[in-house]
Amino acid sequence: MNIGAVIGYLNKTYGYDLNSSYYTYIAEWRDWWTGFHRPFHHFVEMRQNKPIHRELFTLHMGKKVCEDWASLLMNDKTRIDAGEQNQVFLLGNGTERGLFDELAFWLRENELIERAFATGTGAAVLRFENMLVQGGAVQPDENCRICVDYLTAENIVPLTVTPHSVQDVAFATDTVYNGKTYTYVSTHRLIGGEYVIRNAYFSEEAGELKPAELPEGIAQEYHTGSRTPLFSLISPNIVKNFYGGAGLGVSVLANALDQLKGVDLAYNNFCRDFKLGGKKVFYDQSLVQMDENGHPVTPDDIMQSLFFQLGDGCDLGDNHPITEYNPSLRVKENIAGIQAALDYLSLRVGFGTKHYQFNSSSIVTATQYNGDKQDLVQNAAKHSIAVGQHVQTLVRALLWAGKYVLGADVDPEAPVTVDFDDSYIVDKETQKEQFRQFVIAGKVPLWYYLTRFEDMEEGEAKAIANESARALGDPYADA
């Protein structure tokens, strides 16, 4: 997608003064996430005045780092509570699927966090199929379908940035419709106290966007009648030390590029030592046989590259006509170099120095883990603030859409809480025992324990807790 052309369209249409310079950083961060940054990983060697194009071996640690952050921050242990009335709509009730299942919420959110940590920013954007629009305003219709697009920094153009949030934003993606590729631009702008959403399709010609007809079922413009944004942005909780890109975050890899290079250089040396470390057998020309075309024939046809010709066959004297050479593979030295490079990398991306260990063979307790990995614990807590705010904003948008677009019986104003899995600090069994003691001491209600550790729905857990209390003679069991 040509982000420069998209920004040119926005400047011309709305009178903005945006520029695309920050997206150069984003492209580089994305390269390191994919595992190939051409200026670094591609090089040219000359052989007989002919260029030989080669690539460095790579461990693809940029992607591994982002995968690990996503696994820590959004997984199947993450819990979202939006009130009992809304939980059925979001999570289902055992017999009917909830909205999260329809949207593959947990899977897509995990993917979004990985990509957002790679490129600096991610977005979940609501869109609707078969939405009922009358007079430019949205009307509730149970036949409408909610969809969520998950986008990354190269698809996001902040338009209005306040001290607290991104208020107005444009989202641009490449899409294929009827076999042709178009650029789809959707702007979300707060106008007169309500969000106005405008959709446009373009074809690209000579680097410029040419307007194209919208596909059937997509409204050109509609008013939501609400200040609730139908998008939610997420960025790593890192203070940005790059100029430009107002409203966009910074990649978790941005300040670790030298360390990523160090890892790949060490790994490349490790692989090249093995590639170049095969046995070499040098033999004198007097031992060479020629085929009918005058080409030399080596004594062994299994690995002809192991044999080299020396001398001219005269005056061998006491010299050995066959000499064997076994290059050192330097395995220990290379492994130590890779481990050192990984230690520096894991420190720079917030995991501490011991996150990636090839020689780890012992099991540590939760207390030891907490003490040894303070960097990971502290940074995970810091990032969870940003992820929690993102999820809360998204859930509120889904609840708003449920009520005002689908006509569902939900409460968009209900408080939303996000409970993150912290088993990387305290193992689940230890945590379960701690909460069991809290229940016995009366510090935590039994129903909360059942929902958190026994995977019960809130209503079922409260019913069991009340029944248990009545059995024990508690007069306030149903209070």
Image: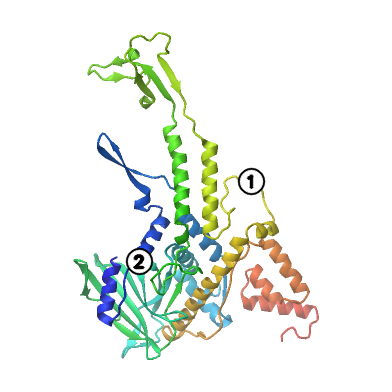
Q: What is the distance, in whole Å, between disc 2 and disc 1 at their CAs?
A: 42 Å
Seen at 44% across and 73% down, the residue is 233
Rendered location of residue 34, percent (x, y) = 40, 55
Seen at 49% across and 55% down, the residue is 64
Rendered location of residue 310, percent (x, y) = 35, 18
Rendered location of residue 63, percent (x, y) = 45, 56
Label 1 sits on residue = 361
Q: Upstream in the sequence, badge 2 or badge 1? A: 2
Provide the secondary structure element on which disc 1 rests. loop
Judging depth in this view, the residue of 305 and 336 nearest the camera is 336
Residue farthest right in this picture: 473
Provide the secondary structure element on which disc 2 rests. helix
Could you tell me the amino acid type at mark 2? Tyr
Seen at 28% across and 82% down, the residue is 14
Q: Is residue 444 visible?
A: yes
Rendered location of residue 383, percent (x, y) = 54, 68
Could you tell me the amino acid type at mark 1? Ser
Left/right placement of residue 208 relative to residue 304 reads left
Label 2 sits on residue = 23
Judging depth in this view, the residue of 180 and 317 nearest the camera is 317
